[in-house]
Image (spheres, rainbow, N blue to C red):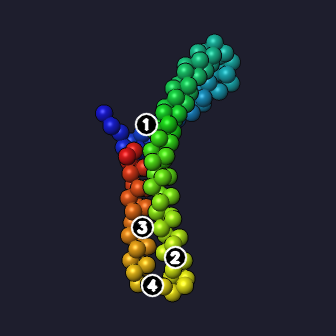
Amino acid sequence: MAFEQTEKEKVIDSLMAEHRQGQIAEINLRLQAKPDEADKVWQENTRLSAEIDILIGQMMDEWLGNAERAIKGLAKINTKLEAAVAEIKKQIHVAQNVVKIIGLLDDAVAIAKKVVKGF
């Protein structure tokens, strides 16, 4: 089942909120002088924290894999953009370069959208 990035973020946000509630529960138990119960909550919350870290790591690995392809595509776009901007500065083929720049920026937006969606 493929998740959209926003869905993945919602899962992580939810797990982090639950982790925070676990921390609050632990603190309250310690303040109520119930160390055994607090230790049990801490132990389970530590397991949850480890799982959250794993999920975040997986998301970053996925994003970085996508980023490598995006970086290559964006580097090509950037080279072409720099050339078009240089020509505009020299007032060479201004109208054509404006059209070229708009197209290149549109290509950059398309790559950015692919990165967000996970290619």
Q: Residues within 10 Å of mark 4 (few under 14, many from 20)?
A: some
State which tag comes first along the sequence, 4 or 2: 2
Question: Which numbered disc covers residue 21?
Answer: none
Q: Locate the N terminus by quadrant.
A: top left
Q: Residue furthest bottom?
A: 91
The reply, left or right, for residue 109 in relation to residue 35 is left
Residue 85, numbered circle: 2
Residue type marked 4: Val
Furthest toward the top, the residue is: 36
Q: Is residue 62 visible?
A: yes
Give whichever of 59, 48 is nearer the camera.
59
Residue type marked 1: Val
Q: Is residue 45 visible?
A: no
The residue carrying mark 1 is 11
Residue, disc 3:
104
Vertically, is 80 above or below 13?
A: below
Q: Pick the residue in front: 99 or 113.
A: 99
Give whichever of discs 3 and 4 has the lower sequence position.
4
Which SS class for mark 1? helix
Q: CA distance from mark 3 to mark 1?
A: 35 Å
The CA distance from mark 3 to mark 4 is: 15 Å
Q: Residue at x 50, y 64 (%)?
A: 78
**Spatial separation of the CA atoms under disc 1 and disc 2:** 43 Å
Disc number at residue 94?
Answer: 4
User: Where residue 73 appears, x then y in whole percent?
Assistant: 45, 55
Q: Position of residue 72 (x, y in %)?
A: 48, 52
Q: In whole angstroms, how far apart are the C-alphas of marks 1 and 4? A: 48 Å
| Label 1 vs 2, first from the N-terminus | 1
Q: Amino acid at mark 3?
A: Leu
* Viewer-side residue, 71 vs 37: 71
State which mark lies toward you, 3 or 1: 3
